[in-house]
Amino acid sequence: MNPTSDSPVAPMLAKAVPTVPEADSVEGGLSYEPKWDGFRAIVYAEGSGDDIERVEIGSRGSKMLTRYFPELVEAFKQILPGPCVLDGEIVVPTGEPGKQRLDWEALSQRIHPAASRVDLLSKETPATFVAFDLLSLRGESLLDRPFAERRAALEDFAGALPAPIELTRTTTDVDLARKWLKEFEGAGLDGVVAKPFAAPYSPNKRTMLKIKHHRTADVVVLGYRVHASGRGVGSLLVGLYDSEGVLRNVGGVSAFSDVRRLELVDELDPLVVRDDSGNAAKGETDRSRFSSGKDVSFIRLRPERVLEVRYDQMEGMRFRHTAQFERWRPDRDPASCTFEQLERPVAYDLADVLS
């Protein structure tokens, strides 16, 4: 398979692990690199010879991001030395020189329906593309090549390109990678990724390893409960898709300010499921000994919005405690929010704990 914008490739994914693994823990060794906090993007730069005639930008969820980043599209056409397919991350750096960091909020605002707004933001908060893999070069697929070869080809192809295209740094030094995990957070990065040198590019497979600063999950909003005051959103109900494609309720997200509760009602209103009379449809969560006598009803929403939450641990198929809102994820496809992304502890015998 040779990926093109007409036959897009799903990005290779990463499995969460608790610590930075030793380089020799995987056959063939590991390459470490920073984990960028942006929109995952696969860039399809198509043309003939060395000329780029068409550029498309796909996201992790197969949504096209092309229209939202016109400054990158133009840069790819002008800068790239030939047709290629690049895997990387779109980020927005903000701040004065010497004090720059990644700005997730500025990046999120780039996803806007109005072309005039997109054009304005492309000038006010221009994006950068950080390349970390090369999937095709001048019509030749590199998917079956080991990462060591793809990385070398990427360095030859894109190592000297000017901004706004950057090549992510890598190391084989596990101690340096652990240092990155601590230090790079101050610049807004998300952790460290470890890639097996011998691995081919495996679309939609969790071949890479990711080490983050805390547990997070991308979940789908399936409803909300009205605040106890009767005004605004008290909590969001969120879910994940199981292996059979069924959306399962995994818990709630709360702790919104009074102002934010009222704003959320308006923001979520277009997603409210309504009956034939136009009234909001309601559902009920399962009762437990803790919810006895409590109102467990909620306003049902169409499962179209994704958010990232912080959580401490799972209990069965639910968050043990109320999750914390991290950010909206407009770049994610709700169907991609599955239980597979969760970090699962290795089974351990209680007797061994007590002994």
Image: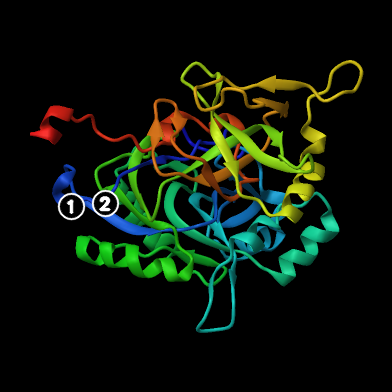
Q: Name the residue under label 2.
A: 19
| Amino acid at dot 1 | Glu
Question: Does 256 appear above or below 223?
Answer: below
Residue at 72%, 41% (x, y): give it.
233
Residue at 27%, 62% (x, y): give it.
177
Q: Which residue lies furthest to the right in this view?
A: 277
Question: Does 338 appear above or below 197?
Answer: above
Q: Name the residue under label 1.
A: 22
The image position of residue 349, as x and y in percent, is: 16, 28
| Quarter of the figure with residue 237 | top right
Left or right: 244 in relation to 230: left
Which of the two discs, 2 and 1, sits closer to the camera? Answer: 2
For this rendering, which residue is in front, 115 or 245?
A: 245
Left or right: 312 in relation to 335: left
Secondary structure of the residue carrying numbered label 1: loop
Secondary structure of the residue carrying numbered label 2: loop
Q: Residue furthest left?
A: 355
The image position of residue 305, as x and y in percent, is: 67, 38
| Amino acid at dot 2 | Thr
Residue 55 visible from this viewpoint: yes
The image position of residue 332, as x and y in percent, is: 59, 41
For this rendering, which residue is in front, 174 or 309?
A: 309
Left or right: 265 in relation to 1: right
